[in-house]
Image (spheres, grey):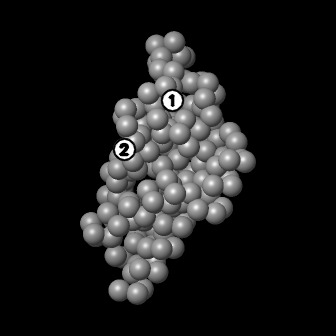
């Protein structure tokens, strides 16, 4: 994913229907993806604001909410890309919301949700999202549309969650 937004066409919200404005506003992470540098990192950092929500919901309801967030994200990311006429643009960060949230599931399940583990999960997710080890890189290149935009970050979240789980068990 190209996160350099300096050469991307600007997003003209005023030229969109109200429906598309709402979709694109969600797709760009309520504005967090519009950061001039490292929009994916800003989107992932914004997703840290969901931690209190996941804590209040508990593991089972959070799992359901993240599943819904991911499924809805397929449409949101795909429609955002279509409206702003780009493929997997770095400004589209709803996928980071879902992937970053998946990273925290082991912490919720094991009741290890503290800021040290949250920051560690944030770093792990960003590492996998940027590095794109197998199969993330293959999916990023070969799966298109909203599903492709979401899937590589979901897998990055799963990789980060698995690493978090391993690190917790080793410590």
The image quarter containing residue 54 is bottom left
Residue 100 screen position, x and y as percent? 45, 56
Marks 2, 1: nearer the viewer? 2
Identify the residue at horizontal 51%, vertical 26% (top origin). Answer: 8
Residue extending farthest right: 142
52 sits to left or right of 152: left
Identify the residue at horizontal 27%, vertical 66% (top origin). Answer: 115
Secondary element at tag 2: helix
Is residue 154 at least partly visible in the picture?
no
Query: Quadrant location of the N terminus?
Result: top right
Which sits in the foreground, 63 or 145? Answer: 145
Residue 129 screen position, x and y as percent? 51, 55
- Determine whether 81 is above or below 54 in the image: above
Q: Tell me the number on the disc at residue 82.
A: none
Identify the residue at horizontal 34%, vertical 54% (top origin). Answer: 48
Identify the residue at horizontal 53%, vertical 16% (top origin). Answer: 16
23 sits to left or right of 117: right
Secondary element at tag 1: helix
Classify 10 Å Cα crowding around label 1: few (below 14), some (14-19), many (20 and above).
many
Which residue lies under the disc numbered 1?
24
Which residue lies under the disc numbered 2?
42
């Amino acid at each position: 994913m190209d996160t350099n937004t300096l050469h991307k066409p600007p997003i003209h919200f005023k030229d969109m229907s109200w429906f598309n404005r709402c979709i694109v506003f969600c797709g760009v992470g309520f504005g967090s993806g519009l950061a001039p540098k490292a929009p994916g990192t800003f989107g992932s950092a914004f997703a840290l604001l969901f931690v209190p929500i996941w804590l209040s919901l508990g593991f089972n309801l959070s799992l359901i909410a993240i599943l819904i967030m991911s499924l809805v994200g397929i449409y949101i990311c795909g429609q955002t890309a279509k409206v702003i006429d780009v493929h997997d643009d770095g400004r589209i960060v709803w996928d980071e919301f879902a992937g970053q949230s998946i990273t925290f599931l082991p912490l919720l399940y094991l009741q290890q949700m503290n800021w040290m583990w949250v920051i560690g999960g944030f770093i792990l997710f960003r590492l996998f999202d940027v590095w794109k080890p197998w199969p993330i890189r293959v999916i990023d290149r070969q799966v298109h549309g909203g599903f492709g935009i979401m899937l590589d970050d979901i897998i990055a979240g799963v990789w980060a969650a698995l690493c978090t789980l391993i690190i917790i068990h080793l410590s």
